[in-house]
Image (spheres, rainbow, N blue to C red):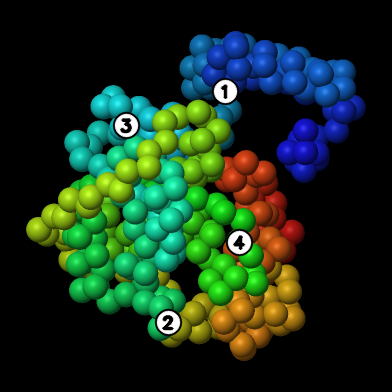
Amino acid sequence: MEMVDHKGIKPDDKLVIYGYSKEETDEVARRFQKSGFKNVSVYYHFVDEWSANDQWPMQKLERFRNLVSPAWVQQLISGNRPAHYTNTKYVIVHAHYRNRDAYLSGHIPGAIDMDTLALEAPETWNRRSPEEIKEALEKHGITADTTVVLYGKYMHPDNAHEFPGSAAGDIGAIRNAFIMLYAGVKDVRVLNGGYQSWKDEGFEVSLSDEPKQAVAEFGAPIPARPELAVDTPEAKQMIASTRAELVCVRSWPEYIGEVSGYNYIEPKGRIPGAVFADCGSDAYHMENYRNFDHTTREFHEIAEIWRNNA
């Protein structure tokens, strides 16, 4: 129950458990009761009563479709049509940073691998030129109209390693996803929890090295969404503006200048005026935005982090 404690749920709290099925609801309630929670109730009618009533309050995120579950991906690769998917072509991408072994040691069936270096230049750790991005996406079989599902494999980054980021494939997936959106891929999804969530669900794992099926043309000018990326001139404008914030999602030791955060970068410190939004213990873990099973924390918990640090 480490996760429960982390979320501040105490044995004396009154709990009401609900879910999409009676079986799931009962199982979670049973686990709480077994762990010493005495005041546990169940509500079985979330689907047929609560969510079916337009007059009753519901919370949902505007872009919830961008974060998908292992079951959603399993439906997709099985030839079925998962919820909120209307396309006819997709590519599953196992993202990594200079670590094909992370891919070859086990991946989602049919997934191809993509190194972040395909889209980022190591000289600057920034996105590559539009021409380079276009070439890379085409080599990986991705057009503007392709649905792309990205995920990575978390492998316990070690700051003493020459390239700790090579063990943080989950972050690599987000970096690639951002550049794809910037380039103009219209439907980009990220697997919630990454490779770990796929394994936790017990779905099939493949060891085959899937060939990339190149396409002739990306199909849109790059960047199609330049507003998603902010460069130094825009960052300076944001700092000077009363209607914008430049947010630092690094760890506290990085923010206050105790460490640079990267063993291959010597300069320390932060951009003056940047607002702190604590990511976690270092540059590679991001545990303040993730649950212990590597899934994304609930949106209201993340919002609370931002409120507390703003």
Task: List the residue tagged with mark 1.
Answer: 56
The 10 Å Cα crowd at callout 3, few under 14, some 14 to 19, many 20 or more, is some
User: Which residue is located at x 42 percent, y 36 percent?
Assistant: 205
- Circle 3 — which element? helix
Determine which quarter of the picture holds residue 58. top right
Residue at the (19%, 60%) spot, across then down: 138
The disc labelled 2 sits on which kind of residue?
Thr
The spot of residue 293 in percent (x, y) is: 62, 41
**Label 4, label 2: how many angstroms apart (C-alpha)?**
21 Å
Residue type indicated by callout 3: Leu
Q: Which residue is mark 2?
A: 124
Near-viewer residue (37 or 98): 98
Q: Is residue 225 visible?
A: no
Q: Are marks 2 and 3 in contact (CB under 8 Å)?
A: no
User: Mark 2 and 1 residues: CB-CB less than 8 Å, in contact?
Assistant: no
Q: Quadrant of residue 19?
A: top right
Identify the residue under disc 4. Answer: 157
